Amino acid sequence: MTGARRRLGALLAVLVAALGLVLGGATAASAHATLEGTDPARGSVVATAPAAVTLTFSEGVSLAADSVRVLDPQGNAVDDGKPEHVDGRAATARVALRANLANGTYTVAWRAVSEDSHPVGGAFTFSVGAPSDTSVDAAAVQDAEAGGAVAFAYGTARTVAYLAFALLAGAAAFVVVVWPRGASVRGVQRLLMTGWVALLLSTVAVLMLRGPYERGTGLGQSFDLSLVRATLDERIGTALAARLLLLAAAGVFLSLLVGQLGMQQPKAVPAGPEAEPEEPEDPEDEEEAELRRLERAAAERPQRDTRLGLGLAGLALALALSATWVGADHSSVGIQVALALPLAALHLLAMAGWLGGLAALAVGLRHGLPAAAVDRFSKLAFRLVAVLVVTGVYQSWRGLGSWGALVDTEYGRLLLIKVGCVAAMLGVAWISRAWTARLRGADETTAAAAGATADTETAGATAGVAAVGATAAADATAADAPAGGGDPERAAQLARQRALRDRARGERAAAGSPARAGLRRSVVVETAVAVLVLVVTTMLTNSPPGRVARAVADAPATAGAGAGASAGASAVPGRTEELRLPYDTGGRTANAKGSATVTVNPVATGPNAVTLKLTDSAGQPTEVPELELAFTLPDRDLGPLPVTLQPQGTGSWTGTAQLPLNGVWVVSVTVRSSDIDQATATAQLKVGQ
């Protein structure tokens, strides 16, 4: 035991070091960086070429060699390729430009990693002297999302990591708290090893895919060691490295769990209420019973000590592993970081305890798991669900910020799906509790029947003592005779019958009672729904919270849209063109049918001031729940370029449209008059022709 304690002490030391490594850099910020300002301002026209382009973000960002690119009208790079922070401020990015830039429109494409480890990106234009045509496809250079294959592989690896952690931590907790004998069961051991191996492989996969995911490159860059080194310099890279270190410690923990706990199982005792000895009437019997209780307690003490030590080490290990997620995700930035971090860790641990425990329960039901252990897990699961609900409500409030974000943002819609899955999971759990009660009753009935049979056999044994002596000689003679009366074929037939009978008995024992089989089925369904919950959770962690999504949507208007409009209008007088687009959403409300009038000035490349007015069928200004305006240039495969609209009164909106090229643009207005009624009207607009 001394060697085991030393190993446990070393394990705890590793956990404390890794936990400090992960949480040491967690500071307050707003999840997902947003671009707050640029110099030159987006859409502006400057008289002389600037020496550098400077970006200001809402929070600190990590920069790579290609984080800020500046392209001339022909698509050639005019920056020095060395983006840096201004005066060491992490929330800024600056890249120097070549000298003597010619007049024309320049495109700035930026891509960075926010403090919550999510890549963000965008693009804008500015002009030197006067706007000009540009060959740059703004839609292609401003995308912050990785390619389809990389994004799918990265998301899959993250999902597998969540599932593996739940399986590893939950199954280990089930063994320590609920069913210590499970440490010696081969099926439970396979669960533990599967969780450990899957978490190791998925962590390595996330580490290798992180570079291509951030930079939007292909899967072929996954083995680029320079990208791996760059990832290790980021917060998420530190968390992944710490997770690998913790997994080495987890391997030691699993060997102790199986080796120590699995080898210290006490002798089997009757389960259920019958396990308690009856109260003896004779004082001498009382002393004997007390002595037996003391002996049993002494025999079980080593296992209790081992379970306590393993439980504390396992809890510390699980906390440290959970920190590798919460220390590099939404919880590490934003409001109330000091409260969000521990609550997020509790949420993750409760999820792991529930899901991993369900998997271990399903295996245990096939290996004679007693009803008392099922009851213990049922009570533990209830507490875990309570923790999930409390921490989940807080995280939802923190991420959404408003009720409208539930339906207006991807984060809110995913959250609604998760809530629905959890509700379904709780419904299945209620069914499982009913099967648990039936299993308890079935086991008590079986135990009572076994006790009655034992009493009958004891009474019959006394009456049959005399008969034993009379038949002993005959039995001895029969025993000496070969089975089947000396007939080898008969003996072989009897052997086959005994083998079939033994196999049938084993199958019945494995299947258990109908209550046990029903509980096992409901647990499998509950586990499947829990896996779906984890998949949605992974998607949530990859989506900007509702608060941030609103900020991102408003960023163009607050960070230069207005400036671009005024600059464009004053720099290029141009002409004004008015487009009338009738629409009919098919709904029955007053605003379901009418006209959208789009006014564009100066109808030239660069920034254009746009006014959109909406009237109903009677010609009166009307409001709608949702309205979108976009410009597309099909000949150059450019767009759609959305316009951020600012309300200017009933039925009137203004904004700025950046049109980088001459050509025949398609103006599209999408009107949603109700939750289900929507229509899109289009018209052509010739620019520079």
Image (cartoon, helix red, strand yellow):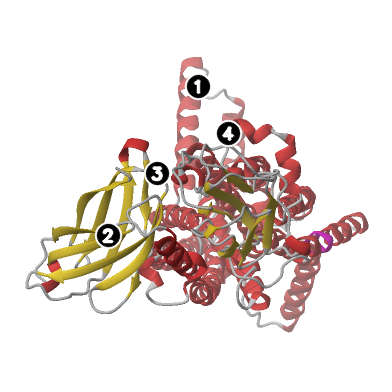
What distance separates the C-alpha of mark 2 from that of mark 1?
Answer: 106 Å
In contact (CB < 8 Å): disc 2 and disc 3: no
Could you tell which of marks 4 and 3 lies nearer the N-terminus?
4
Q: Secondary structure at mark 3?
A: loop
Residue named by callout 2: 576
Rendered view: 241 above or below 221: below
Instruction: Name the amino acid type tagged 3.
Output: Leu
Q: Residue at x 61, y 64 (%)?
A: 57
Instruction: Please identify, in this view, whether the residue under mark 2 or under mark 1 is nearer the observer.
Output: 2
Element assignment for label 2: loop
Where is mark 3, residue-wise?
661
Chief SS of the magenta region? helix
Q: In front here: 233 or 174?
A: 233
Q: Are marks 4 and 2 in contact (CB under 8 Å)?
A: no
Disc 3 to disc 1, C-alpha distance: 96 Å
x and y percentages locating residue 624 in the rendered image: 22, 71
Q: Are marks 4 and 3 in contact (CB under 8 Å)?
A: no
Q: Earlier in the sequence, mark 4 or mark 2?
A: 4
Name the residue that disc number 4 marks: 219
Residue at 67% x, 73% y: name it: 28
Nearer to me, 602 or 380:
602
Quadrant of the snapshot with the N terminus: bottom right
Judge the density around disc 3: few (<14), some (14-19), many (≥20) Cα neighbours within 10 Å.
Answer: many
Say whether disc 2 or disc 1 marks the residue closer to the N-terminus: 1
Residue 613's quadrant in the figure?
A: bottom left
Tell me where residue 514 sits by quadrant: bottom left
The residue where tag 1 is placed is 491
Residue found 52% across the figure and 37% down from its top: 74
Closer to the camera in the image, 149 or 303: 149
Q: Specify the amino acid type for callout 2.
A: Thr
**Stretch of the chain drawn in magenta:** 15-19
